[in-house]
């Protein structure tokens, strides 16, 4: 079965934890009441610039119920920067890019990890926390990068390039991580590549990230043909049009974008670095060239900056919603299981990245 087919399989009830480990709980009331309004008012204050008042009565009962049920389950919610504002700002305990989430996953003492992101992120949390229950609210939340390469592809590349170390993006399946020497993210990619102290390094699977790394280092980069379906859709022409309309605009881009797009940007970096740029430098007007929920989340923390949003949504990230998070905690689904033999090998490549002093 292909990785894409595997991610699209329906939830299998037999994969649920034993009821003795996680007793069932009743679905809480989801009515908009004065009690709910009072309990969530401080959270709405965080997102009032990006969520209209008319929408909050729908979100608030879920927010209250999820935050209460986290305590019952001793659960922690990890949310990627591409999650929607009501998730990112109102129920998440840890937020960040894939590197930050991988690192923080090793520190939690919670019994349950709910991964609000895509499937490879939940696998990474399980790899790093084999004794914890890891849930993803929708097991169909896949990734075009993760499905662009298989473990067999990595083995064939090793055969073609004997002795060349393999660094794989965290946006890959556990099976692919198990074939790698080390993992990397957009936030630490150059440092990881140079830490291998090799004249050549295979960087898989994102071709555009590999091109960007090659422009930042003297190490020869051998790449693959994968790409992110969100970042690949941006064009240099649309960025030039933004700048022509407002020459003072600041363009920030993610390194998964094509090279001609990055050439138009004022700054290129991971989602964490893009957010830091806005919060520290406080530009007047910004185009953030990445998944558009990212701009909403940064806007909530930097209301003085105006965001022009070329909005490309990730259909996989958007599978994660407040109702699905609540159902996940109530019914303890969908649990992420990684074959122990695969997990052990994948853990070595992930931990090698996490433990780098960078």
Image: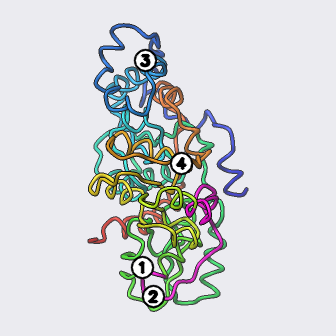
Tell me the magenta residue range: 215-240
Chain-order first, disc 3 or disc 1: 3
Tell me where residue 351 appears, x and y as whole percent. 37, 65
What label sits on residue 219 in the rendered view?
A: 2
Please say if the residues under marks 1 and 2 sit with CB atoms less than 8 Å apart: yes
**Residue at which label 4 appears:** 118
- When the figure is inspected, residue 68 is found, relative to residue 135, above or below; the finding is above
Whole-angstrom CA distance, mark 2 to mark 3, is 52 Å
Please say if the residues under marks 4 and 3 sit with CB atoms less than 8 Å apart: no
What label sits on residue 92 in the rendered view?
A: none
Q: Residue at x 42, y 79 (%)?
A: 193
**Residue at which label 3 appears:** 61
- Judging depth in this view, the residue of 245 and 90 nearest the camera is 245
| Left or right of residue 344, residue 235 in this image | right
Tell me where residue 177 appears, x and y as whole percent. 51, 66
Q: Residue at x 50, y 88 (%)?
A: 220
Chain-order first, disc 4 or disc 3: 3
Q: Is residue 149 in the magenta section?
A: no
Chain-order first, disc 1 or disc 4: 4
Q: Residue at x 39, y 32 (%)?
A: 49
- Judging depth in this view, the residue of 70 and 308 nearest the camera is 308
10 Å crowding of disc 4: few (<14), some (14-19), many (20+): many
Tell me where residue 126 appears, x and y as whole percent. 45, 50
Residue 205 in view here: no
| Element carrying mark 1 | helix
| Left or right of residue 270, residue 206 in this image | right
Chain-order first, disc 1 or disc 2: 1
**Residue at which label 1 appears:** 193
């Amino acid at each position: 079965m292909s990785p894409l087919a595997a991610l699209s399989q329906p939830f299998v009830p037999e994969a649920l934890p034993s009821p003795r480990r996680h007793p069932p709980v009743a679905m809480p009331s989801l009515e908009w009441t004065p009690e709910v309004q009072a309990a969530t008012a401080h959270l709405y204050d965080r997102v009032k610039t990006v969520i209209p008042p008319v929408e909050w009565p729908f979100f608030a009962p879920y927010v209250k119920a999820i935050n209460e049920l986290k305590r019952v389950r001793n659960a922690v919610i990890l949310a990627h920067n591409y999650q929607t504002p009501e998730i990112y700002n109102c129920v998440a305990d840890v937020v960040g890019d894939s590197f930050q989430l991988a690192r923080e996953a090793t520190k939690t003492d919670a019994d349950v990890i709910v991964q609000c992101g895509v499937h490879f992120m939940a696998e990474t949390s399980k790899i790093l926390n084999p004794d914890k229950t890891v849930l993803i609210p929708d097991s169909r939340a896949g990734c075009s990068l993760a499905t662009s390469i298989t473990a067999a592809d990595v083995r064939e590349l090793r055969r073609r390039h004997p002795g060349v170390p393999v660094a794989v993006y965290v946006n890959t399946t556990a099976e692919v991580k198990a074939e790698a020497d080390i993992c990397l993210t957009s936030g630490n990619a150059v440092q990881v590549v140079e830490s291998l102290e090799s004249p050549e390094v295979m960087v898989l699977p994102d071709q555009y990230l590999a091109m960007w790394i090659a422009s930042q280092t003297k190490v020869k980069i051998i790449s693959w043909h994968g790409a992110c379906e969100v970042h690949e859709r941006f064009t240099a022409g649309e960025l030039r049009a933004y700048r022509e309309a407002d020459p003072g605009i600041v363009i920030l881009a993610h390194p998964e974008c094509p090279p001609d797009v990055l050439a138009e940007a004022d700054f290129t970096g991971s989602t964490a670095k893009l957010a830091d740029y806005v919060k520290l430098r406080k530009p007047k007007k910004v185009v953030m060239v990445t998944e558009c929920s990212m701009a909403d989340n940064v806007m909530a923390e930097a209301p003085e900056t105006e965001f022009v949003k070329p909005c490309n949504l990730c259909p996989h990230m958007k599978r994660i919603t407040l109702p699905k998070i609540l159902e996940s905690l109530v019914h303890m689904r969908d649990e992420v299981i990684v074959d122990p033999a695969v997990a052990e090998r994948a853990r070595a490549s992930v931990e090698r990245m996490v433990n780098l002093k960078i």
